[in-house]
Structures are given as structure tokens and as C-alpha cells.
Amino acid sequence: MTTDHTSATQPAPLTLLGLGDMGTALARAWLAAGHPLTVWNRTAAKAEPLVAEGARAAATLEEAVAAADLVVVCLLDDASVGEALAAAELTGKDIVNLTTGTPAQARERAGWARQRGARFLDGGIMAVPPMIGIPEAGGYVFYSGDHALFEQHRDTLAVPVGTRYVGTDPGHAALHDVALLSAMTGMFAGITHAFALMRPEQDVKPTAFAGMLTDWLRAMADMSAGMAHQLESGDYTEGVASNLAMMSAGNATLETTAEEQGVSGELLAPFMASMRERVAHGYGDEGLAGLVDMLRQR
Ligand code: FVH
């Protein structure tokens, strides 16, 4: 049975396993807010600066887990979580796993924790270490899994970075995390291609171009709301401002310009091929929403 330590006046004690870049940033935020914090790291020396800042370093992982009801885990990957916690006594513990993993790994980890008598919440961190402890940086963590656990510890969990609870399915935090990271990856591919196009132009500084690029990407990002409406209504022509036939025809200009500028089109080619295919199947009057179904039908 866990005890509710979370209160506005008395910062709750907790244990943090893992003092890599992210774990260390999280630790500093909890210490700065006055939380009694026990830390453990495989390489013990990484705890030393935190001890100087008020943390208690546990000699063993078992000692660290025993020190608090709330145990936050921030290790490299799911395999390291399994390895580190293999022999730990978890009965009655509230495990919050901030280690990045897949939705399936999170669901398995939830079952693993339940079998060992622990409650489990998975988290997907949407921030990099310098954003931790800086509310205005806009970082947050997606949480999913045991809702009572989340509610009980939400004030403590909100100390380093914002919280967004996305449901009782323990896999949903990881899924949201990976979906956003996947979107970011596509955006970075586009940014990389755009800088490559501009690279030979001595009179256009990358720093000047970056401002234009950022403004344009921000404006275009709002198109995801229109796609979402289409996916919900099932009408993929609803409110389409730029249809697929037009965009696909325009891709030829993008491809030719890349050739002219001596830039490989390899980062954009698969997406353009999918657009062409959808048009060839007779969906040229739609927006991009139909590609979502096409990807799932492969
Ligand atoms: N840093 C970032 O920008 C991203 C932001 C988004 C979220 N990620 C994820 O957060 C997890 C931790 O990331 P990190 O930045 O702290 O990672 P590292 O600095 O590489 O530290 C890794 C820690 O994991 C420990 N560790 C690794 N393997 C084991 C193991 N088998 N048993 C026990 N501990 C293990 C490692 O210990 P040591 O090498 O110091 O002894 C570090 O404490 C991660 O999932 C990111 O994807 C960060």
C-alpha cells in the first residue's frame, strides 16, 4: 500500500534510478524543489555531484528501491530496465518508467510490474535535458498506465517538466512519444534537404534562411488540424486547400530544382512516390489524409 506524500507544503520523497544526462537533470529539478531524493546509478561516481546538492546516494539498487514508495526509472532502454531491476523487491512500489521504449515494451513492462506487486506508469519525455526545470521551455512528459498512481504523484511528477496523461493503456505514452518523434524526423529530413538546396548560394546566409524556414514550417504545421478533421469525418476532400494532384505535379519542380542544385532527392523521394501512387489510384482531389490509410494497408 502506498502512502500519499504529495502535498503543496511537504515535498514527497522519491527514488530515481539512472543518472545519465536526463536522469541528472531530473534529479536537480527535484532537489531544487526540496524533494528528499535517493539516487542510484550503475556507475556510482555520477551520483557524487548530486550528493553535494542534497541527494542521498544508495549503495545498491535494492537500497534505492527500498528508500521510497515512488521509484522513477530513467535508464538507457527497456533492456537496461529489465537488467537493473531483475532482482529488486517491488511489492507495494509505484514504478514510473521514463525510459524511452516502444508501446509493446511499455505494455509488457506494466504486466511485469503488476506480477511483482507494483503499480506502473509509463512516461515518454518530450524534452531534452536543458529544458528540464525550465517551465517556459515548454517540455512535458506523456504518461499512461495506472491512473490512480498518476493522480497520487502528479504534483511530484510535474516538478521537473509538465505532465500530459494520455490514458490507462500503458503503451499510449510511448506511442504518443514515438508518433511525435516520427513527425519530427520527417520535418528534420525536410529541413536538411532545404539547407542542402541553399548551400551553394554564397549570398544567402544559413542563419538568414533559417528564420524563413522556421516561419514557414510553423505556418504549415497547422495543416495537421485539417488532416485530423478529415480523418474523423472520413471525407478526405473536406476543406482541401491544396489537393494531392496539384501537390504531386508540383513535386516535379522540387525534384528538378534538387537536380539543378546538385542535391540528392533521397530524403523526399519515398513520400513523393506515395503521393504519386495515391493520385494514380484516383484520389487527386483529396488532401494528404488518404496517405494515412495507404500506409496502413501495405
Ligand atoms: N537525453 C535526451 O536528449 C533524451 C530526451 C528524451 C528522452 N530520452 C530518453 O531518456 C532516457 C535516459 O536518457 P539519458 O539522456 O539520461 O541517457 P544517457 O545519458 O545515455 O544515460 C543512460 C543511463 O542508463 C544507465 N544504464 C545503461 N545501461 C544500463 C544497465 N544495463 N543497467 C543499469 N543502468 C544502465 C546508464 O548508467 P551508466 O552508464 O552511467 O552506468 C545511465 O545512467 C533514455 O531512454 C533516452 O532515450 C533522453
Image (tube, rainbow, N blue to C red):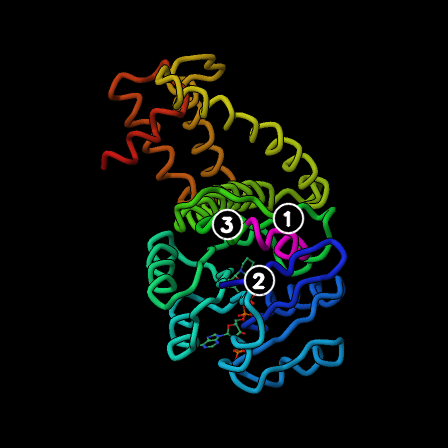
**Disc 3 element:** helix
- 10 Å neighbourhood of mark 3: few (<14), some, or many (≥20)? few
Local SS, label 1: strand
Which mark sits nearer the N-terminus, 3 or 1?
A: 3
Q: Nearer the viewer, mark 1 or mark 2?
A: 2
- Where residue 291 sits in the image (x, y, percent)? 34, 29
Q: Which residue is mark 2?
A: 3
- The label nearer to you, 2 versus 3, is 2
Residue 46 within the segment the image draws in magenta: no
Q: Is residue 262 visible?
A: no
Q: Earlier in the sequence, mark 1 or mark 2?
A: 2
Q: Quadrant of the C terminus?
A: top left
Q: Amino acid at mark 1?
A: Gly
Q: Could you tell me the amino acid type at mark 3?
A: Ala
Which segment is the magenta one? 151-160
Left-right relation of 9 to 275:
right
Number of numbered tags placed on the structure image: 3
Instruction: Give the image location of residue 156, x and y in percent.
Output: 64, 57
Give the camera-side residue of 120 and 76: 120
- The residue that mark 3 highlights is 148
Q: Where does the image place residue 145, in percent across and percent down from the top left? A: 44, 50
The label on residue 162 is 1
Query: Do the residues bearing badges 2 and 3 touch, measured as CB atoms within 8 Å?
Result: no
